[in-house]
Amino acid sequence: MQIIPLSEGSFTIDKTKVFVPFDVDTEELNNRPVGSLLVEIQPFVVVTARDVILLDTGLGYKDAEGNAQLHANLLKVGINPSQVTKVLMSHLHKDHAGGVTIQGSNTEERFISFPYAQYYVQRREFDHALQVGTASYIVEDFQLLEEFSKVVWLDEDEGWIDEYIQFELTGGHSLYHQAFWIHEEGETAFFGGDVAPQLQQMKSRFVAKYDFDGKKCMELRQRWWAEGQTKQWTFLFYHDIQSPVWRVG
């Protein structure tokens, strides 16, 4: 199993829910508004014997040449975007689902970013995101999934995809957030999305105000951290600047 972080950069975010680029080498966090959080935006690509799997899709920004940054990041590590076979979505907040679709050149029309892949999306999260109307969800980024023939809608609270990818409805961060485990040849890669976004949060009893249910998130992190230590998981942290991939053992 090959695991590659696809960093889109560091950002601060405050109560406005706007992601502002942040240079960790030259800027001071204290110069940002009080309460600003410093996060990395970091989808992952996991290459297995059977699939090229994308875990969440980033902000959906374009690079200096006008190309989708997520596509450019894949190309930099030798993966053509057309090679992606599965896109696993933890939830649909804008920093995770911005790259579900891509805006065409010189047009407002949007297209599915990975048309040859199957998208695995929690149905209840999608329906909720269409209705809730908050700054965290940008509906135009993911609305096309409703018409896309290769979407696999996950309705269950837990289950398996192709007998080696496990999913579980966790709630906690968003109402219908879900986590994934990829099992191959004795190795387990665990992706907890925004319930388990950073290494340091796994090691402390931390309750975040930005979570839908912060106490539940804390309890899940404690459970996963203990189980992962025992079973020697590889943890993937979407918002961790220093330790995106943490291997136990």
Image (spheres, rainbow, N blue to C red):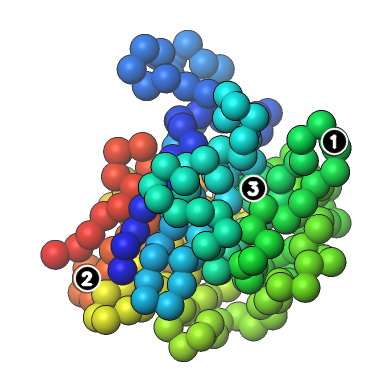
Viewer can see residue 19: no
Q: Dot 3 surroundings within 10 Å: few (below 14), some, or many (20 or more)? A: many
Which of the two residues, 217 or 47, is positioned nearer the viewer here? 47
> Nearer the N terminus, badge 3 or badge 1?
3
**Residue visible at 14% across and 65% down?**
249
> Where's the N terminus, which quadrant?
bottom left
**Kind of residue at badge 2:** Gln
Say which mark, if any, is on residue 232.
2
Answer left or right for 211 relative to 224.
right
Q: Which residue is mark 3?
A: 99
Label 2 secondary element: loop
Which residue is at 49% across, 37% downward? 8
Question: Which-is-in-front pick, marks 3 and 2?
Answer: 3
Q: Is the C-beta separation of discs 3 and 1 under 8 Å? A: no
Q: Position of residue 200 (x, y in %)?
A: 31, 46
Q: Is residue 126 above or below residue 238?
A: below
Query: Looking at the image, which residue is at 34% across and 47% down?
Result: 244
Distance between the alpha carbons at the discs numbered 3 and 2: 31 Å
Does residue 25 lie above or below 90 as drawn? above
Q: Which mark is residue 107?
A: 1
Between discs 3 and 2, the one toward the N terminus = 3
Provide residue 7's location: percent of width, then percent of height: 44, 40
Q: Secondary structure at mark 3?
A: loop
Which image quarter: residue 209?
top right
- Circle 1: residue type: Thr
Front-most of 46 and 22? 46
Q: How many marks?
A: 3
Residue 75: x and y, percent?
47, 46
Q: Is residue 232 left or right of residue 190?
A: left
Can you see residue 84? yes
Q: Residue at x 27, y 75 (%)?
A: 187
Label 3 with label 2: CB-CB less than 8 Å: no
